[in-house]
Amino acid sequence: CLFGVESVAADEFRRMGFEDIVTENGRVKLSGNGNMLARANICSRFAERILINVGEFSALSFTELFDGVKALPWENFIGRDDAFPVNGWSINSKLFSIPDCQSIIKKAIVERLKLKYRISVFPETGPEYKIRFSIMKDNVTMMIDTSGEGLHKRGYRRNSNDAPLKETLAASMCDLARIYPDTKLFDPFCGSGTILIESALMATKTAPGLKRFFAAERFSFLDPQIWRDERTRAADLILKNIDFKAQGFD
């Protein structure tokens, strides 16, 4: 999530039913099953991405990075035909070269899958599993992105202006402003109306991701039914007869 939004996002996840919630700088750690993963993507107003934490370890050299990545159970997620591009970032670490980290992580995953699937070539023609890594002070976290496009892209706006306010940040502002079903909201500098739209979604309890697609909907280890169930659950929570009104000017 965006820096400064961690506590707001954590409270939202608690209301969703998540457990073991821990806030850190720029992210919230939590645990849940496949249904909860789908729920987080569909319903979260404040998170930028929902990622599966495959594993964490410390690495002071590229050899330790390779061994740490190779030891993780990638076969539980990635099939023999699936694509798995690698991207990430490194801060205050001896492993500061992003291209080198990408190459080593990719090679380590391939070597792990070679042993498990007994094949030497991976066509990567199947669904895409975006691998993301973060290295903070030599602590490595390996993740799989389940969202695809960032969650601030709700699906209701085709184009944006030159200086857009992120929908996730606008939603955070609405949360801090305490938007209720009977709120009267005025935005005198509304721009393209992001705050107005996000406040209306919040007042009606409309899940922001109801009308968009997520990368994890293609994942073979997740039952497609969970997405239908969670969309139905979210749709049932929408409030239709409320007194909320919002006006904007610019």
Image: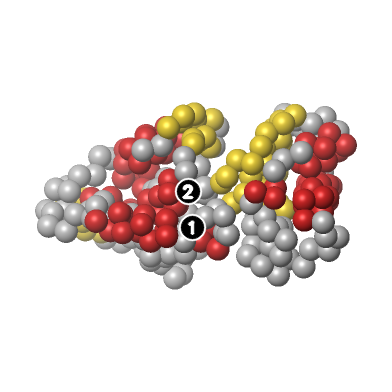
Locate residue 60, reporting x and y percent. Answer: 82, 30
Left or right: 54 with respect to 120? Answer: left
Residue 79 position (above or below residue 65): below
Residue 155 position (above or below residue 147): below
Label 1 sits on a secondary structure element that is loop
Locate residue 106, reporting x and y percent. Answer: 79, 52
Label 2 sits on a secondary structure element that is helix
Residue 223 - label: 1
Residue 111 position (above or below residue 240): above
Question: Label 1: few (<14), some or many (≥20) within 10 Å?
Answer: few
Q: Nearer the viewer, residue 7 or 238?
A: 238
Locate residue 155, reporting x and y percent. Answer: 42, 65
The residue beneath circle 2 is 34
Would residue 194 be visible to someone looking at this image?
no
Residue 73 - label: none
Circle 1/circle 2 CB separation < 8 Å: yes
Q: As shown in the figure, which amino acid type bears the numbered disc 2?
A: Gly
Point out the tag, 1 or 2, that comes first from the N-terminus: 2
Colour scheme of the picture: secondary structure
Residue name at image x 64 percent, y 51 percent = 77
Question: Label 2: few (<14), some or many (≥20) within 10 Å?
Answer: some
Q: Nearer the viewer, residue 238 or 8?
A: 238
Q: Name the quadrant of the C terminus.
A: bottom left
Residue 84 image-quadrant placement: bottom right
Residue name at image x 37 percent, y 51 percent = 43
Q: Nearer the viewer, residue 216 or 173?
A: 216
Q: Nearer the viewer, residue 115 or 228?
A: 115
Locate residue 59, reporting x and y percent. Answer: 79, 31
Q: As shown in the figure, which amino acid type bears the numbered disc 1?
A: Asp
Residue name at image x 24 percent, y 56 percent = 236
State how far apart marks 1 and 2 are (Cα). 8 Å
